Image (cartoon, rainbow, N blue to C red):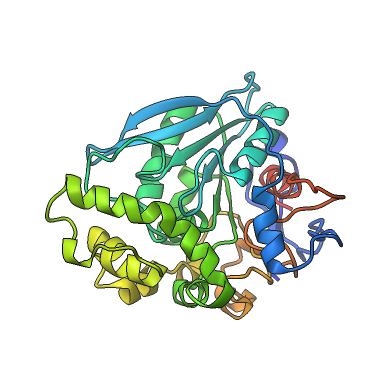
Amino acid sequence: MVGVRAHRSVLEAGLKAPAMRDGGESGPHRAPAWLRGAHAQTIWPALVGRPRVRWRREALDAPDGDVWQFDWVDAPAQPGAPVVVLFHGLEGGSGSHYARALMAEVAKRGWRGVVPHFRGCGGVPNRRPRAYHSGDHAEVGAMLATVRRRAGDGAPLCVAGVSLGGSALLNWLGRAGSGAASIVARAAAISAPLDLTAAGRSIDHGANRVYAYTFLRTLNPKARTIASRFPGSLDPARLGRFTTLWAFDDAVTAPLHGFDGADDYWRRASSKPWLATIAVPTLVLNARNDPFIPASSLATAADVSPAVVLEQPEHGGHAGFVTGRFPGRLDWLPRRLLRWFETGA
């Protein structure tokens, strides 16, 4: 694996560029013996009690006239303390188990945090005929620039993305190259589907279809709402009760965002080709037993730039990473992320 290390902490060194290291000193995730199997490790975290987080909701105008919903975690001011940005996964948000677990730890540290909601995920209807997608690098860049302005120049920005949010983040990091460093100090992508074709085919087949059904339960009515509010944006004849993500992406995601069908979207929005041009220190964390991201589609050292750390534990499921005795804890992932943001290790 590729690795990077900071010589001092964030607060001491201002998140200076790290030097190369081996990457083995990462406190690897170990799944508890009572939680066996990829599906259990994926589903159970949604059932574990989530920490309470005090959010401050802020509605902001997007550059195209739409509206964004940002949920902030405000903590007592500490000079130079980072601001942690989290981009959520498909149909997620600030209520997702990983968001609340991370932001609870952020608050404990006395850092600030924010969850920017993708279009349609903040509980407020869109003003524009648009949604969000795995390659939405322009949206990520615009949101980060907004957070950068509102956070103040003295606060390092550390950003994480989970699943779809991780894919969109990696797309932006790769395209921005060295320019990303003017906004972001360190980054992390968790359970990101680096190859959308491989992940899309996997989630639409076999037992994995339960995840597709879960996502489509909210995606289907959202598509009908967009078609009703913005005539001509979608073909009504193609809108039905979609049962696969391929069908939804082909009829909804692709035409809304300028792709020529689902296959074109999956190809052009995949983040794997952009890993080689990332310049900001970035952790890419994928469990090898993720039920709908085939291990064969994950990145290798040959795919990434020297700024990228690949961490691929054998277990953890999709955005799960539960540890401890029954009923388990959700704190391994946020602590792993904050350690990376603070030390680069």
Q: Position of residue 314 (x, y in %)?
A: 75, 70
User: Would you place residue 275 above or below residue 118 in this image?
Assistant: below
As drawn, the residue found furthest toward the front would be 241
In the shown orientation, is residue 135 left or right of residue 240?
A: right
In the shown orientation, is residue 324 left or right of residue 97?
A: right
Residue drawn where x is 74% and y is 53% of the image: 345
Q: Position of residue 313 (x, y in %)?
A: 74, 66
For residue 123, which quarter of the picture? Answer: top left
User: Would you place residue 130 above or below residue 33 in this image?
Assistant: above
As drawn, the residue found furthest toward the bottom would be 296
For residue 19, which quarter of the picture? Answer: bottom right
User: Would you place residue 147 above or below residue 29 in this image?
Assistant: above
| Residue 79 visible (yes or no) | yes
Q: Position of residue 268 (x, y in %)?
A: 35, 71
Residue drawn where x is 17% and y is 66% of the image: 237
User: Quick one: 255 or 42, which is closer to the camera?
Assistant: 42
User: Quick one: 295 or 204, which is closer to the camera?
Assistant: 204
Residue drawn where x is 31% and y is 74% of the image: 264
Q: Position of residue 204 (x, y in %)?
A: 47, 73
Quadrant containing the N terminus in the rendered view: bottom right
In the rendered picture of this protein, how many numbered marks are placed on residues?
0
Residue drawn where x is 73% and y is 40% of the image: 9
| Residue 193 visible (yes or no) | no
As drawn, the residue found furthest toward the top would be 76
User: Quick one: 55 or 155, which is closer to the camera?
Assistant: 55
